[in-house]
Image (spheres, rainbow, N blue to C red):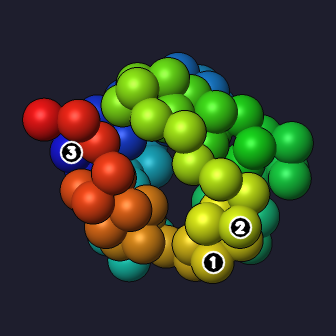
Amino acid sequence: MLERIQKVFVQVTGITDFAITPKTKLDNKEIGLSSFAIIQLYCEIEEEFDVEIPNAAIKKMRTIKDVMAYLEKNISR
């Protein structure tokens, strides 16, 4: 799952030399993205995993680990 999220990150940002880890914070200070790019990242994650992430859930997500936990609970197997 982490590899797929990394792939999406590279697609959205074009940044290939930043390794996503579960501890990576989803804020513009940690990953250097604008708020718009972070929204794009969530949209592409939804597309990649065929899941809809409600805004209320997104607001609670602080790290990649949070995203992975949400996906594990909500993706079709």
- For the view shown, which residue lies furthest in the left direction? 77
- Callout 3: 10 Å neighbours few (<14), some, many (20+)? few
Estimate the x, y position of residue 47 in percent, counting from the top left: 50, 23
Q: Earlier in the sequence, mark 2 or mark 3?
A: 3
Give how far apart the Cα atoms at labels 1 and 3 are.
20 Å
**Residue at horizontal 55%, vertical 39%?**
52
The residue carrying mark 1 is 60
Q: Secondary structure at mark 1?
A: helix
Label 2 and label 1: CA atoms lie apart by: 7 Å
Q: Where is 61 relative to 51, above or below?
A: below
**Mark seen at residue 36:** none
Identify the residue shown where x is 71% and y is 67%: 56
Three-letter code, disc 1: Lys
Residue corresponding to mark 2? 56
Mark 2 residue type: Ala
**Residue plotted at (37% across, 41% down):** 5
Task: Report the Cα–Cα distance between label 2 and label 3.
Answer: 22 Å
Q: Quadrant of the N terminus?
A: top left
The count of marks equals: 3
User: Do labels 2 and 1 touch, CB within 8 Å?
Assistant: yes
For residue 31, which quarter of the picture?
bottom right
**Left or right for 45, reference 30:** left
Label 1 crowd (10 A; few <14 / some 14-19 / many >=20): few
Q: Which of the two residues, 63 or 56, is positioned nearer the viewer here?
A: 56
- Find residue 1 and name its label: 3
| Residue pictured at 23% horizontal, 35% vertical | 76
